[in-house]
Amino acid sequence: MTNDKQVGGSHYQTKIQTWDAIIAWELGFLDGSAVKYLSRWRKKGGVDDLRKAMHFIEKLIEVETGSKSEERGGYMHPIKP
């Protein structure tokens, strides 16, 4: 089974594998990527991983709302870092 084989760092060794949660919850690419970064931020990337998760969430909000911001000349950015 692939969960028994570790490729990469120890930050992926948890009781619940992130990819198993993403599959079980039927998440897509954007929300699944956000979950990936949120699940590892304390053990790997720190605040930078939180920013990456936020970036994926911002894109998901854009896709789901179809919102564009006139003042920024592109899609809205509902969460400002």
Image (cartoon, rainbow, N blue to C red):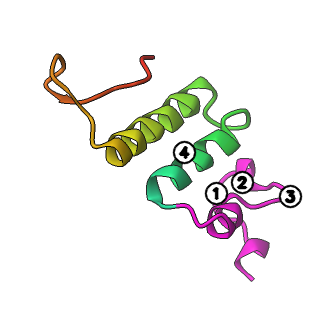
Estimate the spatial distance between the alpha carbons at disc 4 and disc 2, rounded to whole Å: 15 Å
Q: Which mark is residue 12?
A: 2
Q: Which mark is residue 34?
A: 4
In-front residue for pair 13/25: 25
In the image, the segment drawn in magenta is: 1-27
Do the residues under discs 3 and 1 have CB atoms within 8 angstroms? no
Indicate the quadrant where residue 20 lies.
bottom right
Q: In the picture provided, is 45 more to the left or to the right than 14?
A: left
Closer to the camera: disc 4 or disc 2? Answer: 4
- According to the picture, the residue beneath numbered tag 3 turns out to be 15
Estimate the spatial distance between the alpha carbons at disc 4 and disc 3, rounded to whole Å: 19 Å
- Packing grade of label 4 (10 A; few <14, some 14-19, many >=20) is many
Q: In the picture provided, is 68 more to the left or to the right than 25?
A: left
Closer to the camera: disc 1 or disc 2? Answer: 2
Estimate the spatial distance between the alpha carbons at disc 1 and disc 2, rounded to whole Å: 8 Å
Closer to the camera: disc 4 or disc 3? Answer: 4
Is 66 inside the magenta-drawn segment?
Answer: no
- Is residue 25 shown above or below 66? below
Do the residues under discs 1 and 2 have CB atoms within 8 angstroms? yes
Q: Amino acid at mark 1?
A: Gly
| Mark 1 / mark 4, whichever is N-terminal | 1
The quarter of the picture where the N terminus appears is bottom right
- Is residue 44 shown above or below 2? above
- Packing grade of label 3 (10 A; few <14, some 14-19, many >=20) is few
From the top left corner, tell me how far across and down residue 13 is, in percent.
78, 56
